Amino acid sequence: MKHSILLVEDEKIVRVSLADALKSEGYTVLPVADGNQALAAISEADFSLVITDIRLPEVSGVEILRTSLTENSSTPVIMMTAFGSIKDAVEAMRMGAFDYITKPFDLDEMLLTVKRALELQTITCENIRLKKELTSYYGGPNIIGEGKAMQAIFALLDKISRTDSTVLILGESGTGKELVASTIHYQSSRGKRPIIRVNCAALPDELIESELFGYEKGAFTGAVAKKPGRFDLADTGTIFLDEIGDLPLLTQTKILRVLEERTFERLGSTESTTVNVRVIAATNKDLEKSVHEGKFREDLYYRLNVIPLVLPPLRCRQEDIPLLIDAFTRKFNDQMGTDVTFSAESVHMLMNYHFPGNVRELLNIIERCIALASERVIRPDDLPLHLSGTRAQKTSLLTLQDITAEAEKNHIIQILKLTGGNRSRAAEILGISRKTLWEKINGHQLAL
C-alpha cells in the first residue's frame, strides 16, 4: 500500500524540500501552505499521516491536530516546532500527537519518525480491520463452532478474557491461534488498547531483539534515531508472540525478564523501560520436548504456561465444517460481489477430508473455488483434485507448476525432519533465509 501524507508548512523552502524527500521515499505527498487548506484536505480525503507546523497563519497546527483526530483517530500526526515553542509541542503530544520535531531538523531523523508513525498507523488499521472481521463473522463467542470441542474452548475463553494472565495457545498450524488471541484481547479490559502481533519465526535472528525491544540512537550502524520496539507499542495493551518456540535462547531470556519484572532495556541503553503488557504466546511446537532438548528455557515455558489453551485440529471437529463453509462463503461472496453456494455433495466431500492445513486450508479452498467458479453452485468436480481419491485419474492433468510446488513442499518436509524442526538450520541447508522458509511453510500449509 502506498502511504499518503498531508504536509502543512508555510515556509516554502521547508515545504518543498521536505515534500521532495518524502516523495523520494515512495510516499504520496500533498503539500499545503496554510491551515485552511489543510482542514479542507482532511475533510475531503483520508491520509496515512499528517505532518504540520505548530505556528501557522490563521489556523494553528493544534487545530489541525484536533480536526485530524476527530475525522480519523487512527491517523498519526507529527508536529514541527521551533525550539522556543516546545511547550506547545508537549501540549500537542498530550492531545494525541504521535511525536514532534524541532526546527531546524535533521532530514534522516524526520524520515525515521515518519517511518515509525506509518508503522503504527498500519498496525492500528490492521487492528481495526481484524476487530471488524471478528464482529462481522464470529459474533458472540467470536469463533465458529457448535461441537463439544469448541464449546469447551468458548467456556475457557470467557474465563480467560476476564483475567490479565499470560496465555499459551497450542495447536497445529492453521487452527486459528491468532484469531483466538484477538478474541481474548478484544473481550478483555484491554480491548480498546492496541494488540501488537509478532511472528517470531518470520524475524531474522539478528533483528528480533531490536524489533521487540527497540533501540537508541547510535546503538548500531544505521541507528540514526531512537526506535520503539513492539513491547513499547503494546504498552497498556496486549502483545501476541506467535511461533514463540522459534525464539533464540538469548531473546527467550529477555522475554522472561519482561514477564517477571515488566522491564527491559532498549539496544544501546542502560536505562530500564517499564511496560504494562499482557502477553499471549502461541506455537505449534511441543515446547516440553523443546525444553528437554535444551532449545527452550524451562523457566520461560512455565512462565508462559500460566493458562494453556489447546486448539483442536479441524479433523477433530468435523461437525463444524458446514458452519465454517457457510461463513467463509458469505465472506468471499461479499468481497467478490458473487452469489456462489456449495452443493450438498461438495460439503459432504469437504467433511470427509482430513485437512492437514486445518481451518486456514479450508478458508483457502473456499476462496479459490469462489474466485474460479464458472457457475453459481460449486460441485465436487470444482473442488481441488487432492480432496477426492475417486478423481485420481485427473492428476495427470497437473501443471508443471503444481508438480514443482509439490516437490518443493516434500523437500522442505524432509529437511525439517532431518534438522529436528530447527528452522534456522533448515534454512541454511536449503540456501534461503529463515523468513523465506517461514513463508514457504505457511504457503504450503505445513502442519509442523
Image: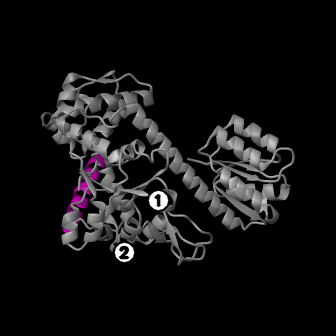
Residue highlighted by disc 2: 250
- Dot 1 amino acid type: Asn
Front residue of 112/166: it is 166
Taking the magenta stretch, the answer to whether it contains residue 402 is yes
Residue 265 picture location, percent across and down: 49, 73
Front residue of 214/327: it is 214
Front residue of 158/336: it is 158
Is residue 377 visible to us here?
A: yes
Q: Which colour scheme is used?
A: one colour
Badge 1 local density, few (<14 within 10 Å), some, or many (20+)? Answer: some
Q: Residue at x 25, y 49 (%)?
A: 403
Residue 353 picture location, percent across and down: 17, 38
- Dot 2 amino acid type: Leu
Residue at the right extreme, as displayed: 57
Residue highlighted by disc 1: 276
Q: What stretch is highlighted in magenta?
A: 401-418
Taking the magenta stretch, the answer to whether it contains residue 391 is no
| Between discs 1 and 2, the one toward the N terminus | 2
Q: Which residue is drawn at 32% across and 32% down?
A: 369
Residue 329 picture location, percent across and down: 34, 29
Relative height, residue 19 to residue 251 (above, below): above
Badge 2 local density, few (<14 within 10 Å), some, or many (20+)? Answer: few
Front residue of 90/23: it is 90
Q: Which element is circle 1 on?
A: loop
Q: Residue at x 36, y 75 (%)?
A: 250
